[in-house]
Amino acid sequence: MGVAEDMKKLFGEKLELNIYRTDSEQALKYDFKSSTNVLLDQELIPLEIATDKSRMKDFLSKKLSV
């Protein structure tokens, strides 16, 4: 959750952050295969990007046109 929270601080209102457990109602519809999953606009982000602060910042900068 550290990377996600850091990205929320960095991108502010351009990024809506929701954190759910894999057994939550919101997560069940995705049929996740692991306990850590990150979505942006319903698209699954590769774990090697989502868990790396630098790579996630670069990824979001491109996606959010910052």
Image (cartoon, grey):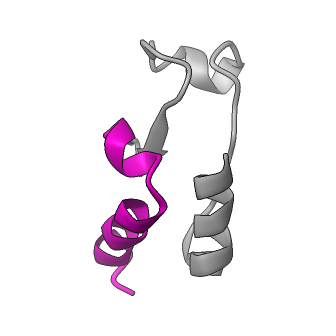
Residue found at x 36% / y 77%: 61
Camera sees residue 17: no
From the viewer's perspective, is 28 left or right of 56? Answer: right
Q: Give coordinates of residue 57: x percent, y percent.
A: 42, 70
Of 14 and 37, which appears nearest the observer?
A: 37
Quick one: which residue is furthest to the bottom in this view? 66
From the viewer's perspective, is 40 left or right of 58? Answer: right
Asked if the stretch drawn in magenta spans residue 62, the answer is yes
Of 44 and 55, which appears nearest the observer?
A: 55
Camera sees residue 65: yes
**Secondary structure that dominates the magenta span:** helix
Asked if the stretch drawn in magenta spans residue 60, the answer is yes
Residue found at x 64% / y 26%: 26
From the viewer's perspective, is 36 left or right of 59? Answer: right
Residue 48, located in which quarter of the rendered image?
top left
Residue found at x 58% / y 56%: 3
Q: Give coordinates of residue 50: x percent, y percent.
A: 43, 48
Magenta stretch, residue numbers: 46-66
Look at the picture and state if 64 lies above or below 33.
below
Q: Give coordinates of residue 6: x percent, y percent.
A: 64, 66
